[in-house]
Each structure stands twice: as C-alpha cells, then as structure tokens.
Image: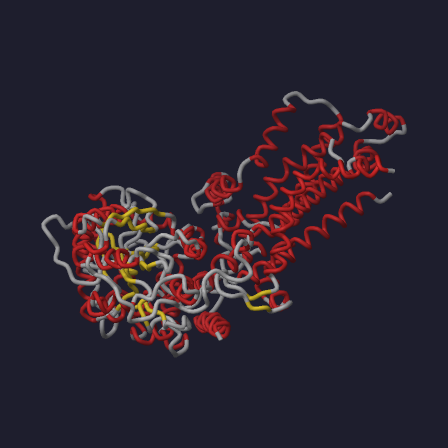
Amino acid sequence: MHGKRRGRFVGWLYILPALLLYGGVVLYPAIQSVNISLYSWDGVSTPTWVGLGNYTDFLSDPELRIAIEHIGVLVVFYAFVPILLGLLSASLLARHARRGYAVYRWVIFLPQVLTSVVVAVLWKQLYGPDGPINTALEAVGLGALTKDWLGDFTWALPALGLVGTWTTLGLCMVLFVSGSAAIPTSLYDAARVDGAGAVREFFAVTLPALRPQIAVALVLTVTGALRTFDLVWLTTRGGPGTSTITPSLLLYVKAFSIGDVGAAAAIGVVMAVVCLLLALVIVRVSEQD
Amino acid sequence: MNHPRATTDRRTFLGLALAGAAAVPLASCAPGGGGSSSATTSAGASVTTDASALGNVTIAQMDTWTDKTSLQAQWIVKVNAAFTQKYPNLKVKRTSGTFDDINKTLKLKLSDPSAPDVVPANNGWQGIGTLAKAGLIKNLTPWVAAYGWDKRIPATIARQHQVTPDGKSIGKGDFFGIPMAQGGFITIYYNRSKLAKLGVSVPTTFDAFQDALAKAKAGGEIPMMIGTQDQWLSTTTLFALMCNYAETQKISDFVYGVGGTAADTGMKEAATTYQAWAKAGYFPKNFAGTPSADSGTAFVGGSGVFYFYYSDSLPFQTEAKSNAFGTFLLPTQGDLRAVGASNQNFSIASNSKHADAAALWLDFVSSRAAGELAVQTGIMPFLDTFEATADTGPLLKDELGELAGVQKSDGFVPYFDWATPTMLDTMGAQCQLLLAGKITPEQLVAACQKDYDAFQKSQG
C-alpha cells in the first residue's frame, strides 16, 4: 500500500520538469488568453470587462465570415488534394520497388522542410506578372491564360491554396509510403490470389491499412489550413480587397495593428477550440471499426 | 511508426499553443495594464534648458532607420555627432529597429523602467494617441514654452504631434511629440527624358497634369507607374488626389476627428479621377499583380512617365541615376496643399530619467541646423525653407522648391490613415476594389465612413 503510493508519487516526479515547462509555455498562456478574451483591452490601458462581448462581436463580424469561407477553400488545397495525391503516389510506390525512389521521396518532402518565409518569397516570384508561371504559359502558346495571379480577385486564393498543396504533399506522401511499407505482403498476395487488380487491391488492402496515417495527415493539414497566416501575410496581406483574408490574419491585425487585444484573444481561443474539436473528431472516426 | 493518437494530441496542444501565442508577449502584464490611464506631467513643471547644468548624460535614442546606407540613417548620425559637438557633456546612444517592429513593441518598451529616452512613436492614433492616453510618453508643454517650438513649427505640422491631455483627441491640445527637420511629401516623380521626348513641360495646373497623362498615353508610354499587389501603394495616389478636391482644414478635421464626414474630404472626387485613370489605361497592364517595391524598381529602371511616391524613397542605385528624375507636387486648385509630414515624430518616454537632456535633443533635431545637415546629406529638410547649395543635385533642388511652396501656404495635409488604426488596411483593400472596377467611388467613401464611425464609437 505504502510502496504503491510512493510509486505513484515518483511517477509525477519524473514528468515534473516537462510538466513545468509545458505549463509555463503552453497552459498558462492559453489560460491567460481566455482571460484576456473577456476584456476590452488595447494592450496598455486598464482593461474593461466585457464578458462574452468579444465573442458575440466576432460572430457578427462580416469580415470574419469571409475569412472562414476562405478557410473552407484552403482546407481543400491543404488537406484533401495532398491526401488524395499522397495516396495515389503511395499506392504506386507500394507495389514495386523503384530505382531512385529515395531521391524522389526526398524531393517531394523538401517543401515541408523549407521555412514559410522562403516558401512565400519563392512563390511570390513564381506568381509575379513576369514570373516563371506566366512566362511558361506564354512560351507554350497559352498567353491568354496568364494572370496577375496574386492580384486577381478570383485567382489569388486558389493560387495561395496551391502553395499549401505543394508544401503538405510531401508530408502526406512520406506518411503513406512508410505506412504502406508496414502492410504485410501476405495481404497483397492473398488479394492477388483472389484475383484483385491494382484498383481493387488499393481499396481492399492499402486504404484500410493506412487509416491511422490518414488521420494523422488530416489533423496536421487541416489545422495547418486553419492557422494559415505567414503565407498570406507575406504575399497578399489579405488582398486584393479582402479576397485572401484568414482568421489568423484578422487576429494579427487586431492584436498588433489595431490594438484590440481582447478581440484578438477571442479569435485565438475560438480557433484553438475548433482545432481541438476537429482533431478529436478525426481521431475518433479513424479509430472506429 | 508513431501511434496516431500520441501524435495527434501533441499537435492539438501545439495548435492551442500557437493560437494563444499571439497574445503571450502582451499577456505578461495583463490584465491590469502598464501605465496610468491618463497623461502625466503637468504643465508648468520647471525645466532646464541649460545643457551644462545637466552633467554627463547619455541619452538613449531610438529610430526606424535600420539600413545604415540609407540617407536618413546617414543624416541622424550626423545630427547626433553635431549635437555632442555642441553639448560635449551630452552623448547619444542610438538604436534602431524596423518601423513595423518598433510600432508593434513600443507599448511594452515604454512600460519598462529602462525605456529609451527618445522614441520614434508614429503620429496618429496608433502611435502618440494611444501612448499619450496610457501616460507612456511625456506631455512636452513645459519644454514647448521654454524653447518656443510652437513658434518654429508650422501650425498644420504642429497638429500632427498634438494630443489633448485626456488622450481623447488628436490634432489639438498639447505637444506629445516633436517633428524633426527632415521630412517628405507624397510627391509625383517624373522621368526627365521621357517628359522632354513627349514635348511636355512640368505641369503647373491640375488640368495640365491630366493633359500630360493623356499625351503620354498617346505617345505610347505608360503614363503612370504603380503596383498595388501588396495593397499599401494603392492608397498613395488617392490621398494625394484628395488634396486637389478639398481644403487642408477639411481633410485635417476629419482625420483628427474634429468634425465633418468622409464626403467632405474630396475623397469621392479623388476616387472618381483615380478610377478613370485606371479605366483609361494609364497604369501598367499588370499593376494589380505587381508588388509596390517592384513598381519603384521598374520606374527607376525607365518604365513609366509619372509615379506617385514618397520623397526620398525611390531605390536609386547611384546619384547619377537620380539626376534623371525630377519631382513636383500635384498642382492643386487654389492654395498649394500636399500630404506631408516630418519623417518621424520623436517623443520622450515617461520613464526617462533624462527628460531635460532628451528635450534638448528634440530641440536640436528640429532645428535649422539639423535641416541644413539634411540638405548636405542630399535629402529633404523640413520645418523651414532652405536654399540649394552648389553641391545640391537637381532632384533635391526640386524638393526644396516643393517645401518652400507648402511652407508658404501652410498646406501640410496629414496622412489620411492616421484617422483610425484600421484606416490604412480598409482603404488599401477598398482602393484595390476601386481600381478593379468592383466598387463605385460612393461605395469607397461609405466604407471609409463606416470604418471611421466604428472607431469614433469605440472611443466613447
């Protein structure tokens, strides 16, 4: 009895350093954000208690509604497209060992390693009026398709979404390839004996086996899309008009340009809760049999 | 292989942390605020203007010129050297940060007991307005009287540095900052050889400027360089155009929240003209996809006849290159008016332990001597009129002419985005919509008014 209790105590002691660090840099600021979100505060003067006022303002803000719609588009580009492409490449690679496979994987994973500033600067150049994309289109006789990509009200958001696809594809692919490498070959043998083709094999063996990896990829990419800030800030600053604004951008502007820290904290809290709920739902669904 | 749940949990908390992170730096003193809620330093406090009575003091001075090779940075170094030469017991320790960094962290810096003595608080609400209200910068009234700053500074410039002692209004009240003797305008640059080739002389009336644009178009040139992809340059031309359609007082009163509506500021007429220029094809074909900085590089590289930009901000590689360009202010109906301000407002931190020495520095940085150092450095002086010297290049000569003109009419119009903290973002997005033909000038004015009303309401 006595020994058991001490064992429990020792367990807490082991995690204490990590817990202190975690509490100090994550939990405490998170709780403080919730606290700040209940005040109207400019960052310096005495804060005024507004209760849930920041949250109701936030729900009735038309800009925020637009920003959330943009997130919907970005989720498609950040999460769905790369997961589909990742599954496709994984299923192709899983069937046979290819020469140069390691190099291929490394190249596709590369964007994931680049810092977001580098990615933004790179793509700003690529999308420029005289940038490589427009030049290439003209070179192959598609001059009519050239656009001011990042200055176009219709195309700026999809253009930024594509950058997201480019960065997250490598992660999805590596996750799925390593996941499918762990699938026992006996399953494939059995499927083949039963007369399954490549397509059937994918749906019957590869896809179900990759369910945990798909869940991880979804959580990472969807929360990534929700938090989109750096790419937009460094390329369009939300423009043209408001056609590329995101909730994170509004958070930043409110906290640091306008000095409405309470409202910014409210956006942060809502986003954190949404991320948490999404992650929970995705994991729950992926674990259901 | 990771267990998915372990990875997931780590990530979700990471998400939580990131979402909360934005508030962290500010959270450290929250809630409860840093300074007191009203401005401190009562008028009538005794001050010393005698440098020798101050003993050996080093003033910590901050500014936004991070690029050591920039003319502004060269100028401030000269100013500080001249200051110490004049007052050998007073030294200046200079630090600099980018405009963005400083403005976003100034509140925290000033809350610190070891705050710099002299800080480059921005004009307008986000800057001196909020800082004065929070009691973080000093009311300069005692020194204004001692040094006679109010007599030296043109009235329309003085307003740019004033806040009421209760912190509720800007554009009137007491000085909470001082302009420096180096400044600039929203000006029109032109390519000298292109203008000559078109057979057009420098326009002296608004109609002549419109004619020049039409002639440039007919002559196969890009009449006006501009790039609006990253928003901010889209407002520049509009703000300059407004000066043609409204009196200085009307625009100033609106910006400072004294009275009037957005419709009184000439904004509708300016937006109409601006949109007509876009429709007439006066801008480069890809202006909507071109970042502001790239448009400047293109103009300096010989593309476009005219360019609305900020004084001394074009990226000239050599001085010889700058000789190929001239500049003039948009000729306005009636008196000459132009959006213009001192390049930086300087304020004294409430926590400064060397306020008298800092005030002496403010006096020096706004003096004629500092202005002459600007001419010597090759950038526009301010707060007085200056003669060109034998070394003055043709571009600076044009600038000295601009300054003399606006000094004479006292027609300094404040930057419109000082009106509210969100105005620059709002107008940047609105101007992009306007130039794309997606909104009418009336809608642009309505959006401006809406932004304004929301802010006024929040001020109580």
**Residue at the location (59% across, 39% down)?**
A167
Question: What sort of colour scheme is used for the picture?
Answer: secondary structure
Farthest front residue in view: A2
Q: Is residue B309 left or right of residue A212?
A: left
**Residue at the location (41% across, 77% down)?**
B261
Q: Position of residue B430 (x, y in %)?
A: 46, 64
Instruction: Report if residue B25 is visible in the image.
Output: yes
Instruction: Report if residue B406 is visible in the image.
Output: no
Q: Nearer the viewer, residue B59 or B254?
A: B59
Farthest left residue in view: B390
Q: Quadrant of residue B110?
A: bottom left
Q: Position of residue A115 (x, y in %)?
A: 53, 38
Farthest bottom residue in view: B260
Q: Quadrant of residue B333?
A: bottom left
Q: Position of residue B51 (x, y in %)?
A: 20, 56
Q: Position of residue A218 (x, y in %)?
A: 70, 44
Q: Is residue B388 left or right of residue B340?
A: left
Farthest top residue in view: A99
Q: Is residue A30 left or right of residue A187?
A: left
